[in-house]
């Protein structure tokens, strides 16, 4: 990411597109973990956005308060402070975010990987603790809510417990896949719809008991993947794909 540049708020509308994702965090620290939304309309005075929702499915509760907005474009991130306001309407509930006088813009040097997509995983079943015989459980599905270097947040109907080990395959909206990632369940929360929001921390093969590490080599002949290496592989592939598409357009 290039260094952030402070810009005049009057220029903000030209950088925003309908359907761009954004994240909202209350300006007052220690209140809510954050909410995600999407741009529905761009006015000269501000944005019209969908109702912000937390990863757990909670609706936003900071209406009328100052919020910090992070708006993710194709090759930039825009950050500004605004006041979230609910629009009065008999139809679909929407919110507005008035544009500020100043905002910061950071241009990216990398591909934006979109999440909120499908994923699959298998439990690593252990017969006698983490040093016992291992096998892979049935294939389960989930929805990827958030992805970072340390782990993932997913939504699934499968029952999981803290401490369980999983083998993960993540499908990204950008077109790539992160395969054979090892993760440990750190927390599980039930949501009103009946599903579960699960926080998973990535693990390295070197974190495992030597016996378990050896058994996983047999269960997964292609090997346990390292998240950092998988991201490098995927980013390089997406950049090559973007370059080919650019060359096609220029040739046309």
Image (cartoon, grey):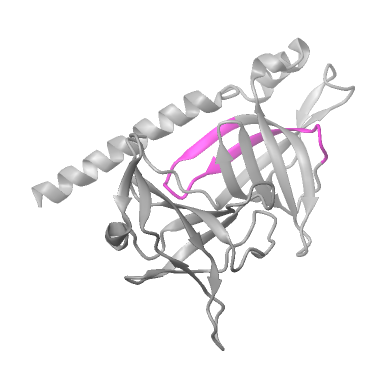
Taking the spot 56% from the left edge, 41% from the top edge, the residue there is: 147
Percent position of residue 231, x then y: 46, 31
- Depicted 81 relative to depicted 42: above or below: above
Q: Is residue 21 above or below residue 161?
A: below
Is 18 in front, or is 14?
14
Residue 51 image position (x, y, % from top left): 57, 68
For the point 55% across and 81% down, the residue is: 92
Residue 46, magenta (yes or no): no
102, above or below 220, in the image: below
* Residue displayed at 34% across by 46% down: 105
Q: Closest to the observer: 116 or 92?
A: 92
Find residue 159 and report its horizontal and vertical position in percent. Answer: 81, 48
State the residue lying farthest toward the front: 101
Residue 99: x %, y % from top left = 39, 63
Which residue of the protein is positioned furthest toward the bottom in this rendering?
90
| 212 to the left or right of 238 | right
Left or right: where 131 falls relative to 203: right
Going by the image, does 9 lie left or right of 190?
left
- In-image side of 47 versus 208 (left or right): left
Between 173 and 102, the one nearer to me in the picture: 102
> Residue at the spot x=41%, y=63% of the render?
19
Residue segment shown in magenta: 161-180
How many numbered tags mark residues here? 0
Direction right: furthest residue: 128
Report the quarter where the N terminus lies: top left
In the rendered image, the residue lying farthest to the left is: 251
């Amino acid at each position: 990411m290039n260094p952030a540049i402070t810009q005049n708020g009057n220029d903000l509308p030209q950088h925003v597109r309908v359907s761009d994702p954004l994240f909202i965090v209350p300006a007052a620290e220690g209140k809510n973990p954050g909410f995600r939304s999407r741009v529905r309309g761009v006015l000269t005075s501000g944005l019209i956005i969908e109702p912000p929702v937390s990863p757990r499915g909670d609706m936003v509760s900071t209406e009328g308060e100052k919020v910090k907005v992070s708006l993710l474009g194709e090759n930039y991130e825009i950050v500004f402070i605004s006041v979230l306001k609910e629009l009065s309407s008999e139809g679909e509930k929407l919110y507005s975010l008035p544009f500020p006088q100043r905002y910061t813009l950071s241009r990216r040097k990398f591909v934006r990987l979109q999440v909120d997509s499908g994923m699959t995983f298998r439990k690593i079943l252990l017969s006698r603790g983490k040093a016992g015989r291992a096998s892979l459980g049935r294939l389960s599905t989930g929805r990827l809510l958030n992805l970072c270097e340390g782990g993932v947040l997913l939504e699934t109907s499968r029952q999981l417990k803290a401490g369980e080990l999983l083998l993960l395959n993540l499908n990204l909206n950008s077109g790539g896949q992160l395969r054979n990632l090892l993760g440990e369940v750190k927390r599980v929360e039930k949501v009103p719809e009946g599903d579960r929001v699960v926080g998973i921390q990535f693990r390295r093969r070197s974190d495992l008991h030597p016996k378990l590490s050896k058994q996983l080599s047999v269960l997964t002949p292609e090997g346990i993947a390292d998240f950092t290496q998988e991201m490098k592989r995927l980013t390089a592939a997406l950049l090559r794909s973007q370059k080919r598409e650019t060359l096609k357009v220029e040739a046309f």
